């Protein structure tokens, strides 16, 4: 504000004093509210995202495999004592390709019985379904292969099909496990490509009985 002037003998202004009000100091400048909110949102998003990622990384429990192994030496597990008593001495065995994936385990073994010129071949496929349920399709696929004889007391479900006296195939389902056993008669030929008949052929009627016995024993081995 400006004070009233002081007169000196009416000749003019002697001094002029200018007074001003003292303003309080400006408070510190606060940060922008929207910037803080944005930072909080980013932090919350990061924490939430990390939680979702950690949750997604958890391994969900798979189906119960019933104690069956997912890493086996199938040729060693196949004792096949019942079949050996009918087909003759067991000869060489050969392992097939092994499939080991997160959703499926599968392995194969083939072995021979009897004399080279008139023996038998037995092949076994062992499959472990680690994710999907094989039951809904099991019977349909068995019927598609003409396996129509139901075998009781072997796993949950089992079907057998004969091969006109030359062998047979047996398939069993036990929970998440499928086992297929096939038996084939081997024939030899002469130098002109003609089949040489066996003079004393092994009768394969009722062969599903020893095949069932050996599959039961194999299932126990695969649980060890």
Image: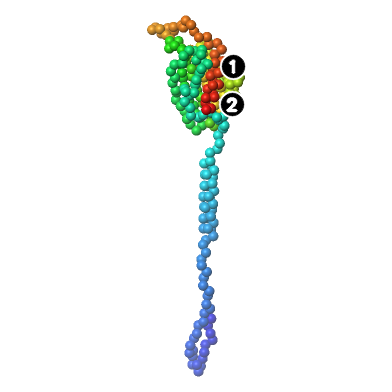
Residue toward you, 83 or 14: 83
- Is 57 located above or below residue 82 in the figure? below
Q: Residues within 10 Å of mark 2 (few under 14, many from 20)?
A: few
Residue 68 seen by the camera: yes
How many marks overall? 2
Task: Residue at the far top: name it.
Answer: 199
**Residue ID at (53%, 27%):** 223
**Residue ID at (56%, 29%):** 66
Q: Which element is circle 1 on? A: strand
* Disc number lying in front (2 or 1): 1
Q: Position of residue 86 (x, y in %)?
A: 51, 12
The quadrant where residue 148 appears: top right
Q: Earlier in the sequence, mark 2 or mark 1?
A: 2
Q: Residues within 10 Å of mark 1 (few under 14, many from 20)?
A: some
- The CA distance from mark 2 to mark 1 is 18 Å
Residue 140 seen by the camera: no
Residue 159 numbered tag: none
**Residue ID at (51%, 82%):** 19
Q: Which element is circle 2 on? A: helix
Q: Position of residue 6 (x, y in %)?
A: 52, 89
- Is 102 located above or below residue 156 in the figure? below
Residue 136 numbered tag: 2
Task: Residue at the far left: name it.
Answer: 191
Residue toward you, 94 or 139: 94
Q: Is residue 92 left or right of residue 23?
A: left
Residue 149 numbered tag: 1
Q: Position of residue 170 (x, y in %)?
A: 54, 18
């Amino acid at each position: 504000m400006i004070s009233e002037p002081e007169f000196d003998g009416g000749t003019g202004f002697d001094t002029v004093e200018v007074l001003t009000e003292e303003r309080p100091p400006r408070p510190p400048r606060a940060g922008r509210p929207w910037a803080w909110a944005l930072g909080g949102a980013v932090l919350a998003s990061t924490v939430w995202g990390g939680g979702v990622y950690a949750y997604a990384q958890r391994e969900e429990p798979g189906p119960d495999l019933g104690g069956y192994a997912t890493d086996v030496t199938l040729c060693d597990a196949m004792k096949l004592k019942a079949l050996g008593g009918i087909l003759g001495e067991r000869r060489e065995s050969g392992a097939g390709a092994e499939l080991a994936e997160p959703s499926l385990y599968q392995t194969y073994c083939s072995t021979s019985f009897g004399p080279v010129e008139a023996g038998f071949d037995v092949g076994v496929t062992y499959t472990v379904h680690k994710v999907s349920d094989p039951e809904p399709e099991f019977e349909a696929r068995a019927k598609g292969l003409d396996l129509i004889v139901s075998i009781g007391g072997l796993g949950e479900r089992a079907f057998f099909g004969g091969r006109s006296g030359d062998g047979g195939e047996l398939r069993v389902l036990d929970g998440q496990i499928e086992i297929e056993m096939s038996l084939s008669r081997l024939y030899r030929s002469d130098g002109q490509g003609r089949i040489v008949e066996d003079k004393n052929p092994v009768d394969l009627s009722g062969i599903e009985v020893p095949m069932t016995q050996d599959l039961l024993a194999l299932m126990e081995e695969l649980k060890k």
